[in-house]
Image (cartoon, rainbow, N blue to C red):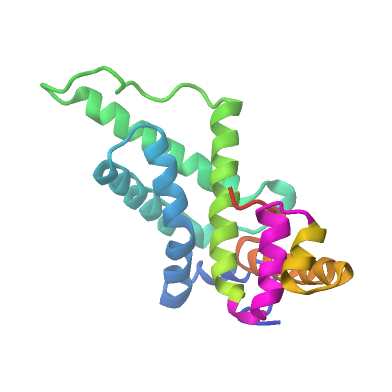
Amino acid sequence: MGQYDTRATLLIRVRDAGDRSAWGQFVEIYTPMLHAYCMRRGLQSADAADVVQDTMRAVARAIAAFEYDPERGTFRSWLYTVARNKLNNHFAKAAREPGVARDGLEALPEVGEEDRDAWELEYRRQMFHWAAAKVRGQFRAETWDAFWRTAVDDEPVDSVAEALGMKRGAIYVARSRVIARLRETIEQVAGEGDVMMLGAG
């Protein structure tokens, strides 16, 4: 079944403080998403990096007790709550510092749909690009091109088939194979309840 052999393997492995490989992969996947979220909320890159570091520390402390159960809520929702709390702490601390302009430093407002939607979009984008980078080498160039041009770039199937010298049915088969592998790859690291595909963004 590839690099991992059980669902939610990474979320289970990362609970072991001694599994450096799992934590390294966890950081690789989630750090860009967290950083982009903080930047979108108005932080400078250095401040965003600090909040990401604080978030990762909090996750490291709490993950040992994390029980993967999609019916009780997704991992990405829990991570969103942790990140938002750390971002609130950053704004509150900055607002208390003497000599610092207070405009824009108030704590974040209550969770709104717009903020959650932005988080979900960033999550899907990061997961897609991470998984795409992992699986691309597993397919022939024309198979990948057939998928990317029709599923991501939204080109008409007929024009892509003509350009690649493939039959229309082969385009659909290629796209289906790649999408299935992407879903499987994401599911194996994020958990079944966290698979939200597709869309490169």
Quarter of the rendering occupied by the N terminus: bottom right
Segment tinted magenta in the rendering: 137-156
Res 183 visible = no
**Is 8 displayed left or right of 111 in the figure?**
right
Q: Main secondary structure of the magenta part?
A: helix
Above-or-below relation of 115 to 200: above
Q: Is residue 137 left or right of residue 193?
A: left
Residue 120, located in which quarter of the rendered image? top right
Q: Is 124 placed above or below 84 here?
A: below
Q: Residue at x 51, y 67 (%)?
A: 15
| Residue in the image at 65% along x and 69% along y | 185
- Is 67 situated above or below 91? below
The percent coordinates of residue 108 (x first, y second) are 42, 25
Confirm whether the magenta stretch covers residue 187: no
- Give the left or right position of residue 103, taking residue 2 as reference: left
Query: Would residue 37 be visible to someone looking at this image?
Result: yes
Report if residue 152 lies within the magenta region: yes
Q: Position of residue 68 (x, y in %)?
A: 65, 59
**Where does residue 3 sit, x and y in percent of width and height?**
61, 81
In the rendering, at what x and y percent does residue 58 appear?
40, 51
